Image (cartoon, rainbow, N blue to C red):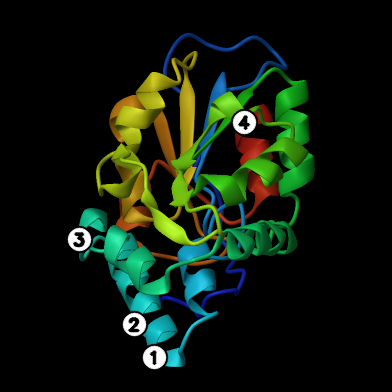
Amino acid sequence: MSTPPRKSRPSGASRSVEAPGSPRALGSPRFAAVVLDVDSTLAGIEGIDWLAQRREPTVATAIAELTERAMRGDLPLEAVYGGRLARIGPTADEIAALTEAYRAALAPGARSCIGALRTAGVRIALVSGGIRQAILPLAAELGIPEHDVRAVELRFDSEGRYGGFRASPLVTHTGKHLVIETLELAHPVLGVGDGATDVHMRPAVDVFAAYVGWVRRDPVIQAADHVLDSFHALQMLVLG
């Protein structure tokens, strides 16, 4: 299976796999909770790559290559996470600008889908290896409370210069399931993401869907119960 260029919106369909458990009541959601990745899932950018594009072209290219290798599973995320940020040295002002970039790159239909799921009583959580300070304002706009957002918090000095990040399982290749377990979600839970780190949600979710609305990665697709190419498809999967 070939991989189309980023930013394309490839066609695809959800595989029909019901959530485990007893038959659901007519009209009720198939899942009690949905865990969404952010970068290249909820929004069509990789936040750290976007920050790198503010630096020398050689830096941006090198960091984008490291990100893609980690998302394919060719490198463990922990081998590249800190090095990428140290090389970029993002400022607090750049993180605020990244929030605007997330807003501009929000997946088509994501806002209405999340609204419909929340109205139906589905709990939505964002679990991302991205930067918490950049993701929180977007989450608030989508009605997702701060306690249901898990991402990596950066440190800055009094002048807004980068000072590292707080330790988190989310900077490791397999850490997402540990973080999801702390959310104490009602089951069944659907996990949705585009990268190899998202596949490692599996121990903490009942069903995993590969999101291919921005980029297709064969190992992620092969590990998934569903393949979703849009948030409309996600809404149909959850609400039927």
The residue at which mark 3 appears reads as: 79
Q: Is residue 121 left or right of residue 46?
A: right
Residue at the spot x=47%, y=15% of the render?
A: 187
The amino acid at mark 1 is Thr
Q: Nearer the viewer, mark 4 or mark 3?
A: 3
In this view of the protein, which residue sits in the foreground, 144 or 96? 96
Query: Label 1's element?
Result: helix
Q: Earlier in the sequence, mark 1 or mark 3?
A: 1
Residue 54 position, x and y percent, is 55, 80
The residue at which mark 1 appears reads as: 58
Q: Quadrant of residue 32?
A: top right
The residue at which mark 2 appears reads as: 62
Residue at the spot x=30%, y=72% of the render?
A: 66
Up-down relation of residue 238 to residue 70 (above or below): above
Q: Earlier in the sequence, mark 1 or mark 4?
A: 1
Residue at the spot x=37%, y=49% of the render?
A: 165
Residue 198 position, x and y percent, is 37, 46
Up-down relation of residue 208 to residue 183 (above or below): below
Task: Check if mark 2's residue and mark 1's residue have beta carbons within 8 Å.
Answer: yes
Q: Quadrant of the N terminus?
A: bottom left
Q: Quadrant of residue 234?
A: top right
Task: Check if mark 3's residue and mark 2's residue have beta carbons within 8 Å.
Answer: no
- As measured in the structure, the alpha-carbon distance from the residue carrying label 2 to the one carrying label 4 is 38 Å
- As measured in the structure, the alpha-carbon distance from the residue carrying label 2 to the one carrying label 1 is 6 Å
